Image (cartoon, rainbow, N blue to C red):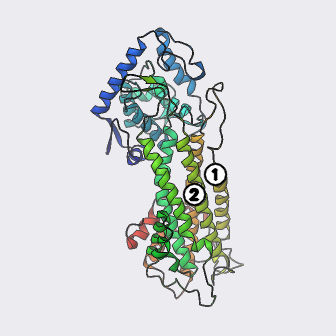
Amino acid sequence: MHTVVVGTSGVTASDVLAVARAGARVELSEEAVAALAAAREIVDALAAKPDPVYGVSTGFGALATRHISPDLRAQLQRNIVRSHAAGMGPRVEREVVRALMFLRLKTVCSGHTGVRPEVAQTMADVLNAGITPVVHEYGSLGCSGDLAPLSHCALTLMGEGEAEGPDGTVRPAGELLAEHGIRPVELREKEGLALLNGTDGMLGMLVMALADLDTLYKSADVTAALTLEALLGTDKVLAPELHAIRPHPGQAASAANMLAVLKGSGLTGHHQDDAPRVQDAYSVRCAPQVAGAGRDTMAHARLVAERELASAVDNPVVLPDGRVESNGNFHGAPVAYVLDFLAVAVADLGSIAERRTDRLLDKNRSHGLPPFLADDAGVDSGLMIAQYTQAALVSELKRLAVPASADSIPSSAMQEDHVSMGWSAARKLRTAVDNLTRVIAVELYAATRAIQLREGLVPAPASQAVIDAVREAGVAGPGPDRFLAPDLAAADAFVRDGRLVAAAETVTGPLR
């Protein structure tokens, strides 16, 4: 099994995906263990002094003015975890929790938190045992960290609360730790606070969304090319020299992908046949511009994610010169903004795909295709309601594009009076990415059927490879009406697991 070694300088997106989705093992580097021990010495020295230090010998948040005596500090750390584990609602996905835990461990290993090496090792042990704390949908405002989600994870380290075992069964966390020979941690000064104070949940979901969108944007380029073919459009608008004079890199990449898919097509360029036209509609002609803008948005979001992955997010932080300083680095605004920005791009990509699908189904705009791509229109409804479903998904995408980060709600007796709502932005983006997959699947279903209805015209080799692969996957071609839901589910799976892109790439080579 692949092993990810966590050091002091952060982790990569591929590390997060390996641990969250592929179950990779986690190890602490010698450098990280040394940094943990050195930072802990600083915290222990401050804890022994009579002067109050926030997070070490004081209360938290609006209660930070109270100095806590040494005999109550262990209880203080336990109490912050128990009281902050106040999430509600359905459980979030296993991969999200694993990303959350792993990214918190990343910050702990930076040597800026003051957590003992044995606590970090226990975090790694829990991940490696396949134990997943029960974390709930609601509880984070995205400021002072993803507090409630991280608290539920810390509660598991203490052997309290509930967690899911490697067999998928939810049980008391203490039982699961005992079965795997993991000793519950007894938290000391600052450790409870350090386990809760980070943007790890929203960052983990950003990293996974970017990975999913990388595949989906390539998928959208493929389906846009298939639709262009099915509508007998022109590929001249995809010429590199046209995109070079408006040098957005994402636009150039999308146009290049579409051009690669269409190479050798016998369907493109029929503008002057029976239904002459000067230009294709915007949804076809401007596909690279819209998808390209989304790609450039992803590039910016990826830059933010890389910076966060290299960060140590905690409050207070232990500095190499021995100071323990309060700060505002836990605020989720940088991550929240790009999560919301991506949701806007996702909604627009879904919107343009739906417009292309509708054009394929409308006999007045499809340049000779049968109404709704039906076998016997009137007796058969064809893909009429598949487009309804796609339209409903797009409408939902538009609602999900409303930014969460534009909102703020004060908390903690007005101490935390401006929050990022980054967790909420991440949760709605996750839903949006899921729905975009379905939108692209409907366009794929319609476009492949439409191409096959163009009798006597030969599609591009890459298009034919996609058609062959999707038919083999159980998605039916032209014919009388049938129960559509299973076909749509099969098309969804075909897009979701990357088979659409893989099929096109058997001819085109790697898409950009």
The relative height of residue 68 versus residue 101 in the rendered view (above or below) is: above
- Quarter containing the C terminus: bottom left
Q: Is residue 129 left or right of residue 494?
A: left
Task: Work out which residue is located at the far front of the displayed protein and give it.
Answer: 245
Question: Residue tagged by mark 2?
Answer: 346
What secondary structure is marked by label 1? Answer: helix
Question: Residue visible at 45% across and 49% down?
Answer: 303
Question: Can the viewer see residue 473?
Answer: no
Question: Given the image, on which type of amino acid does mark 2 rest?
Answer: Val
Q: 141 and 227: which one is in front?
A: 141
| Image coordinates for residue 173, horizontal then vertical, percent | 47, 28
Q: 302 and 90: which one is in front?
A: 302
| Image coordinates for residue 146, horizontal then vertical, percent | 54, 35
- Quarter containing the N terminus: top left
What secondary structure is marked by label 2? Answer: helix
Residue 224 numbered mark, or none: none
| Image coordinates for residue 333, horizontal then vertical, percent | 56, 41
Question: Can the viewer see residue 34?
Answer: yes
Q: 506 and 293: which one is in front?
A: 293
Q: Residues within 10 Å of mark 1 (few under 14, many from 20)?
A: many
The relative height of residue 116 versus residue 262 in the rendered view (above or below) is: above
- For the residues labelled 1 and 2, the Cα–Cα distance comes to 9 Å
Question: Residue visible at 68% across and 65% down?
Answer: 388
Question: Residue tagged by mark 1?
Answer: 400
